[in-house]
Image: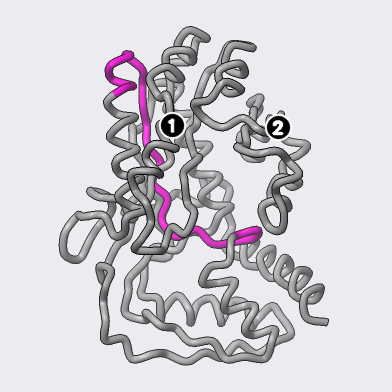
Amino acid sequence: MKELAKAGHDVTAIYRSHKENYSGIRLARIKQVEGSCRQVFNCPFGKAPFFSLIKEQPWNLFCHHAADVTDYKSPAFNAIAALENNTLNLKESLTLLKEQGCHHVVLTGSIFEQREGIFSKDDRAVSPYGLSKGLTADFFAYYTALLNLHMAKFVIPNPFGPFEEKRFTTYLIDSWYAGIIPEVGTPLYIRDNVPTSLLAKMYVDFAINFTKGGGSLKLNPSFYAESQKEFTCRFAREMGARLPIKCPFTIKNQTEFPEPIRRINFDYPNVKALGFSEEVFWDELAQYYATKSCALFK
């Protein structure tokens, strides 16, 4: 949202729940964009408040990023319930958007859904969550075509950076600051880890070109496409050079492979044209962790 605003666009961010229901890292994200966009709370997709918002003014582009992600790593994840939440009253929503002058839709996809990325074995979804995302894309493709709308898709790999959820890199950092040696449990998996600030720049460039009628209709951003062992080495090296902590880790002997060994994207960015600097990203990430971790562990 910040990058879209920087590019001169008026951005409206909608949230499913009331502001007071957000806490922790999610509330921090909300505060990060307070000055960059209009924020509308308690406005879930496909429900009455969302319809009322659409009718308020004309729109140029609808970006659908929201998805049901509760326990998304669990094999018990309810893909059908997630699909229903992701596409609730989809035809009515798209029809109202079209009536307000919106003819372009960008859907956020996932590298873990079916038929996405470069894969080691087959193109099935990696998980029930991935399955729900792929089905969501199918629904959007069907109804945007039915209503003669233009649809594009931005496929997210493994993002990492400031304000991320409790995921692999935060596990590493939290362990190091606590004096614990973390373990890399899936060192042989080849994944695509992309800095969040680079993803944001790629998203804005993609969306702007799409609304202007240029560029592609799908982008699969790629950056650090390597084994998790190699990425851990990279992360430890960059953080160790910038933070006053030691960054050791152990490598587990991986013998089980419930997920594909390789699942990566393939669209490598022109970082110079996008104005992205790896050095600056690592500096900013280290500064974020230093501030966050000092507050947590001192």
Residue at mark 2: 39
**129 relative position to 6: left or right:** left
Q: Is residue 98 magenta?
A: no
The quadrant of the rendering that contains the C terminus is: bottom right
Q: Is residue 204 above or below residue 157?
A: above
Who comes first in sequence, dot 2 or dot 1?
Answer: 2
Rendering quarter of residue 223: bottom left
Range covered by the magenta-colored residues: 143-164
Q: CA distance from mark 2 to mark 1?
A: 19 Å
- Most foreground residue, 292 or 241: 292
Rendering quarter of residue 30: top right
Crowdedness near tag 1: few (<14), some (14–19) or many (≥20) residues, C-alpha within 10 Å: many
Task: Name the residue rendered at 40%, 24% in the picture.
Answer: 90
The quadrant of the rendering that contains the N terminus is: top right
**213 relative position to 162: left or right:** left
Task: Name the residue rendered at 62%, 19% in the picture.
Answer: 53
Q: Where does the image place residue 157, in percent across and percent down from the top left? A: 41, 56
Q: Secondary structure at mark 2?
A: strand
Q: Where does the image place residue 216, in percent across and percent down from the top left? A: 34, 33
Q: Is residue 145 magenta?
A: yes
Task: Name the residue rendered at 42%, 13% in the picture.
Answer: 95
Q: Secondary structure at mark 1?
A: strand
Task: Name the residue rendered at 40%, 44% in the picture.
Answer: 82
Between tags 2 and 1, which lies in front? 2
Q: What is the three-letter code of the residue carrying label 2?
A: Gln
- Most foreground residue, 18 or 269: 18
- Most foreground residue, 178 or 76: 76
Q: What is the three-letter code of the residue carrying label 1?
A: Val
Residue at mark 1: 106
